[in-house]
Amino acid sequence: DAGVIQSPRHEVTEMGQEVTLRCKPISGHDYLFWYRQTMMRGLELLIYFNNNVPIDDSGMPEDRFSAKMPNASFSTLKIQPSEPRDSAVYFCASRKTGVTGNTIYFGEGSWLTVV
Amino acid sequence: AQKVTQAQTEISVVEKEDVTLDCVYETRDTTYYLFWYKQPPSGELVFLIRRNSFDEQNEISGRYSWNFQKSTSSFNFTITASQVVDSAVYFCALSEPTSGTYKYIFGTGTRLKVLA
């Protein structure tokens, strides 16, 4: 089975530009999570969805960040406008209720650099 | 509140040595899950093991073993006869499904360097 698929793997963009990160969860999984990893703050949960509905977005740093999940197989995380402090690795993860005891499986991450 | 502490920031060992990575957690729930993930230099996060709070049985998988002790709120990870390929950052994580939030709290990670 395919794992969580993220794109792009690497992105370098200029400050002020819009950045869109994409995620395809594992088929059949009903939860989707967006995490951000930085040296200073470690792994932070930004937002998570259940059955395509955002449940908790308290980790989203500010209004420049937004996330959507239009269907069960696709989600986006958008940063507009981007700033250098947004440089980080962004991970998408998914899990299936009632199976494998709440284990979440991560994608390979999107490495974002804002210059 | 949930909290996961990995006090060891970095560990260096010589190949074939045994090494134990410590994880201490805090939770008020009686039902919870603990996890270990591996992040190799390539950057992906790889699931290693899950343990639920009702199962204190230790587990062994090849060179890897895990010791779960509720009395000390610890879930330690031991690599026997370490290899260079074990070099990675290892994260311990906690999930409290009964809280309804399904947040997974990660420790700060332990960087393991295995030297040839």
Image (cartoon, coloured by chain):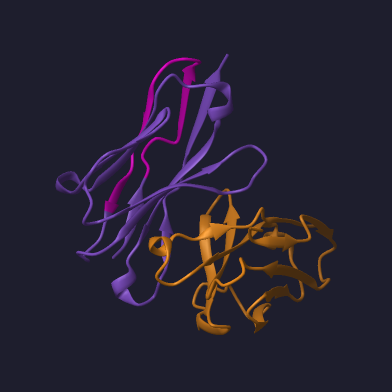
Q: Is residue B7 magenta?
A: yes
In this rendering, position of residue A58 left or right of residue B8:
right
**B81 w.r.t. B9: above or below:** above
Colour seen for chain A = orange
Range shown magenta: B6-25
Find residue B35 and report its horizontal and vertical position in percent: 39, 51
Q: Is residue B103 magenta?
A: no
**A11 w.r.t. B36: above or below:** below
- The residue positioned 51% from the left and 72% from the top of the image is A59
- The residue positioned 23% from the left and 51% from the top of the image is B55
Decide which of A64, B76 is in the foreground and name it: B76
Which residue ends up furthest to the front in the rendered image? Answer: A1
In this rendering, position of residue B17 left or right of residue A17:
left
Q: Quadrant of residue A4?
A: bottom right
Decide which of A88, A83 is in the foreground and name it: A88
Decide which of A79, A25 is in the foreground and name it: A25
Query: In the picture, which chain is purple?
Result: B
